[in-house]
Image: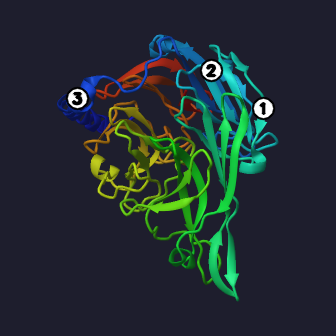
Amino acid sequence: MKINSFKFLTLAALSSLSILTSCSNDDNNNGQSTQPVTEDRWITVAGAIMGSTDPIPGDGNGGTIVYSISKNDAKDASKTFDVFENGFLVPSNRTARLQSSQDGSTLFSIAYSGSNGGEYSKYNVGGGQNFTANGALVNISQYAGTSPRWVKLFDGDQTGVAVNVTTPTVVTDAGNYSRTRGTATVLSLNLANSFISETKSYEIPLTTAEEVLGHHIFRLDAPVLNATKNKLIIGTWMRKTNPATGINETTFTHLGSKSIVVDYPSLENPTVITSTVGFGDTSGYRSFNSFVGDDGNIYQATQRDAAGSHILRINANNQYDNSYVFSLDTALGLSGTYIENWRYAGNGKAVVAYTHNGAAVSSLSGQAQSFLALVDLNTKTAQTLNLPYNTDMYFFQYQGYVVDGNEVYVTAAPVGQDGRVYVINTLDGTVTPGAKLINKPGNHFIGAF
């Protein structure tokens, strides 16, 4: 159900945002977007189908449907589209991992799990259910597993990078606990010509002092190419083994947020960098988690952070800038905020999907309710956007936002209920309802591409 008191607060917040943005336009290119505008582009809406085995509404385990509509139609609130009935079924046992070209003309997909898990495919977007295969199928599972983590680099739609860590194993020395490690693999994929460009595998050690306590890298995800295009920064999800038992601890104190830096394009020389501002993971989940800002710095979100999610900054030297402190808890006046996914939108602005301590939990999906905020990385402020929030609306599995000039396109609907495309103006925080999206029981929308 709709939370009216929350809507009242968000309207007040938006009023404050209008004042804030009008005063800060001089610092944000006088309102001129730093992001390209593509006229007559397609907006591809992606939906996740509820699984058929032990189904839970919103689990997305039944596959992925995509349907493309014109930008004008996406903005038109009088239009209605039935994505799940009329869309194209993307080959994938579970929810496919999707990316799109900057102009929306091409959709990239890697199948997730199952017999074709790790299979990369590319499609020309032609409107409606018309997605035409383009190029060879490439299976990266022998390097990155059948459930790979990958993103497209912001290099003109040329490269995708997949990362993987084998199951970390305990190593002992003369019967005494020494460390827990897995073997990491980093793979670059030529998106234009559909072939694997490079792969590298290695163990990535932490410091001896950290490893003897049991800290180790459990997962890598969400790589980003730095501004000078000579380093990849890769997010980490950390875990900790109990040295006395050899069993992973369910709760532990992080030693600071960590990322891996490797040379690009060689993918060699992995090193670990550590933030003293954030104390959560930097891996994200199914979407981008780090972006190069207009100022050349990398901005990276944290998850599972004991003090609530932070947005961290990595400077031109590929080191954490610990003088930059952006706490989402502080910016929103909440506690236990958790950035589920986000998208940089130019001019220091970004759209953030988050939940927080005390958020309602859906009786359908078991997921905490999500919200969207517009954040300003320069002023370190955030305002919750005015949407028709619902207890059954969550963005945890969300994968894609379309950034087109000063506008961000997002799909939003409660699990199993109809929703809409919404267009967010990043200059003033206004949200305009667009085309209606028909849903089906148990299904949910997972992105706009």
Kindly identify which residue carries mark 1.
137
Where, quadrant-wise, is the C terminus in this rendering? top right
Q: Secondary structure at mark 1?
A: loop
Kindly identify which residue carries mark 3.
25
Kindly identify which residue carries mark 2.
67
Where, quadrant-wise, is the N terminus in this rendering? top left
For the residues labelled 1 and 3, the Cα–Cα distance comes to 46 Å
Quadrant housing residue 276: bottom left
Residue 291 in sight here: yes
Which residue is pictured at 61% across the width and 64% down the height?
A: 204
Q: Is residue 429 above or below residue 105?
A: below
Q: Residues within 10 Å of mark 3 (few under 14, many from 20)?
A: some
Percent position of residue 378, x then y: 28, 41
Percent position of residue 53, x then y: 75, 44
Mark 2 or 3, closer to the camera: 3
Mark 1 or 2, closer to the camera: 1
Q: Is residue 297 left or right of residue 70?
A: left
Q: Is residue 388 left or right of residue 446?
A: left
